[in-house]
Image: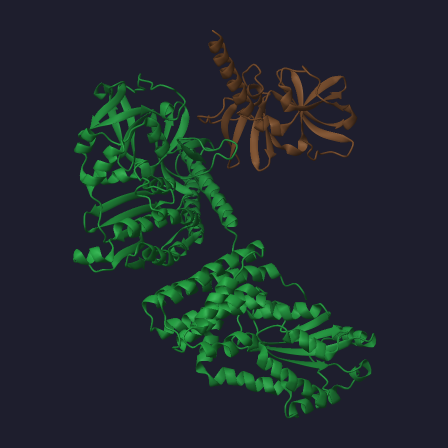
Amino acid sequence: MEEKRSGTAGEEQLVVFTLANETYGIDISSVNEIIRMQDITEVPRTPDFVEGVINLRGRIVPVIDLRKRFGLEVSEKTQASRIIVVEMDDVTVGMVVDSVTEVLRLPKENIEPTPPMVTGVDSAYLRGVGKWNDRLIILLDINKVLYKEEKEEMSQALEEASAAVDDGGGR
Amino acid sequence: MSDFDMSQYLSLFLEEAEEQLQLLDEGLILLEQDRQNRDLLNQIFRAAHTLKGSAASMGFDKIAVLTHSMENVLDRFRDGELEVTQEVVDVLLECLDALQALKVEVIEQKDTIDVSGLLEKLQALQEKESPGEAPGEATGEDSWVASSSDSGESKGEEAAAVEAAPKAPSTEFLNDTEKLVLRSALEKGYKSYHITVDLEPDCVMKSVRAYLVFSNLEKVGEIIKTVPTTEEIEEEKFDYRFELILITKEPLDRVKEIVLSISEIRNVSVLEFPKPEDLNGVKVEQREAEQKVKAEPKPAGIEIERKKKEVKTDTPAGAKREADKKRDNRRISQTVRVDVNRLDTLMNLVGELVIERSRLESVGESIRDTLGAGGLTDSLEEISLHIGRLSGELQEEIMRARMFPIEQVFNRFPRMVRDLARKFRKEINFIVEGKETELDRTVIEEIGDPLIHLLRNAIDHGIEPPEERKKLGKPSAGVVRLNAFHQENQIVITVEDDGRGMDPDKIKEKAVSKGIITPEAAEKLTDQEAVNLIFVPGFSTAEQVSDVSGRGVGMDIVKSHIEKINGIIDISTKKGAGTKFTIKLPLTLVINRSLLIRHNGRMFAFPLANVVEIVEVKEEEIQYMQQQRVVFIRDSFLPLFDLEFLLGERAEEDLSSQTQEGLLFVVVVGISERRVGIVVEELIGEQEIVIKSLGNYIGDIPGLAGATILGDGSVALILDVRGLIEKSGVEK
């Protein structure tokens, strides 16, 4: 999906952060602000990657844990942990990341489509890989990060279920 | 000059149309019952006329034509040529429906509705009884189209007058710049006209008419000045006459034609400015010329004056109407229409102010604790108190601004009741009271459907057919009464009928046959409990649901609708004597008094409306029935639940109770007859909270009604007691 990106024609401006020792970038135009960790009120009956809600200056904002979202190993929050508040289509969501490192401008020619098996993260969440001073920056597609529905998880579950049924039938 | 905003007039028109349609609707239904009431008939006629006028001026021809035909029929009522019968009223009501649809069409800017069928019906009514008479007057040249006919005549007269005495208008009221503009235009060969327009004295929406004059003229030239100013005209601050200066290349007659093409213009006079050379220092001559004009036997200006006087003084009725209109205008200028979203935002802001206020209070408390009373601490508390009072008042005022009279909902019912009564062949005396009762917009939006359902039920099932009623010694017309009033901090709405009432035994029987309840359980029910069974999902059934009272909605939906807006509904019924539904609603849905509790490190808020009581239970008092903790309180067993279980966070009840020195706090919550006890760790207290949604990303979660921000900035989840009780599985 091609949406309008920030920066001048030839480059993209990214917020760069780390997650489980990998470097990620998201388009700065979808980022509202970056805040320190704060108390998160857990909300029952939500997917496990939804940490809960916070009070963002009088607004109730849901927070998701990106590690959990990507199925990475869950770790303790540290002093460096941050919540990146993104806004997409009237929905404001906070994303917990290990740390936010910088904001940089990445020339477009440095961006390549996602090679298979570049990271532990499902490539469906990605929109490419950027090269910056010998570093790899994994570019996230925020829309998919937020919305890549449980649909797929469900269809996966269904597949497994039907596989189980098939197994049962074979016996 | 062309700063008029047409959309502004559109909304004005729609508002007015809505008002007139409502008047027509009410009026026709009353007229049907009170057929000889001339005042009422006049009122209806006026409403139709007004609607027609404004539709015509906005160019909504179908509405105009339809209302015009309706007017003709109404006129025949007035002249006694046509009798008010149900059939005629039916047709007229059908027209109202069509008008409503046309109004929607206007909003959606479509053109799909065909009114010719209705027009034929109206035509038939017009010709009824006295066939030969109608065509000339009613169908040929329509009288309302001809309402501009006298201006047509005067057009002729005036044109003659103009030819007879070419007049020079005065430039006195122009300022220097305008004179300059005028002169340079004239030098370039343009023509300039001084145009005086008089509107029909009974013209509604004068400013729209003026707007049309301006916009039509601006197609052919440029308006350099108006008297009064455009702003004043826009605000209707003028008295049926306005003047303007137009620079154009069109000839005088054409300009006049353009103005007269707009309806409800009584008269127009157009004077041409002389050539520039004459403009120079010839003021005196011009004046003379002007006087000459006035002395002319039939000049337009004087003609107008006279006509105006006629209207103003000779007919006191007209004068009164004008006075009424003036009052209306004043009222309009004193109200401001505000987008509801703005009010919502305002409400949210005030909500945050209230939160900050409580923070201030808690900071004040800790300062007192550390620094002790006196001096600054006292001032701080005083300020906090004052801010508290101010924010409270602010909140109340904004809440009031969001309030609407329930009239909005009630007004559509008389028509519905009439139609239903006819459909079911019942005679209904429909009484509406407390229309002026005000309640929050959010509540108003939700309350319509349940009320429709209750009214339909009352007519369909409640009221007996007339013959049956007579046999029972009741008056043949059944009474259905709808009432609304304030009671403490609640709105109470009642729907009452004097029909056959409900039979608890029959309800039990039916509930048993539906498998809703076992025969043994049914045995034990009190009559009231039995009646409440109608709210159980699955009770309202196909056999009971006629196409009307059905709509696929059972009483359980009515109930859940009302509970959704934190309301409660009760029935009282007496077999053979009637049924009364009482609905109690909160004044607002935004702010809520709540009981705050802490549980497992999280804060929760119970809406106080659902909290029955708080009890302390000793551990040894807890008993187990089929793995269910219960406690015996006041002669009945109360099931106890774990909050985590009810919220779906734990699959099983945690039977090891959270005790504090052998004591458990139990919040007893209830929805109508259903009661459950919820074990909580710590009670914090009562507080007013602002309800905020959890947002689209998280969506609706069973058992939660939203979240709120507490005085210390932390977030508490607001519990939805209804959802919790459902999860508990407790039926009653």
Q: Residue furthest top?
A: A171
Instruction: Pinpoint residue B603: horizontal percent, then vertical percent.
Output: 40, 29
> Dividing the image into 4 quarters, which one contains the N terminus of chain B?
bottom right
Q: Is B642 left, or right, of B622 in this rendering?
A: right
Q: Is residue B447 above or below residue B19?
A: above
* Quadrant of the image containing the C terminus of chain B: top left
Most extreme residue toward the front is B132
Tell whether A140 sits left or right of A41.
Answer: right
Indicate left or right for B578 with B597 as reference.
left
Q: Give the total number of marks visible in the rendering.
A: 0
Along the line of sight, the residue nearer the viewer: B60 or B22: B60
Judge whether residue B416 can be spotted in this image: yes
Image: B586 above or below B265: above
Q: Is residue B165 visible?
A: no
Palette colour of chain B: green
In terms of depth relative to the viewer, which is nearer, B572 or B517? B517
Between B587 and B430, the residue placed more toward the observer is B430
Q: Nearer the viewer, residue B118 or A75?
A: B118
Q: Quadrant of residue B246?
A: bottom right
Left or right: residue B121 compared with residue B659: right
Q: Give the residue at x 50% y 12%.
A: A166
Q: Position of residue B406 (x, y in %)?
A: 38, 54
Picture quarter containing residue B650?
top left
Chain corresponding to brown in the figure? A
Q: Position of residue B463 (x, y in %)?
A: 25, 53
Give the color scheme: rainbow, by chain, secondary structure or one colour. by chain
Residue A44 on image: x %, y %: 44, 26
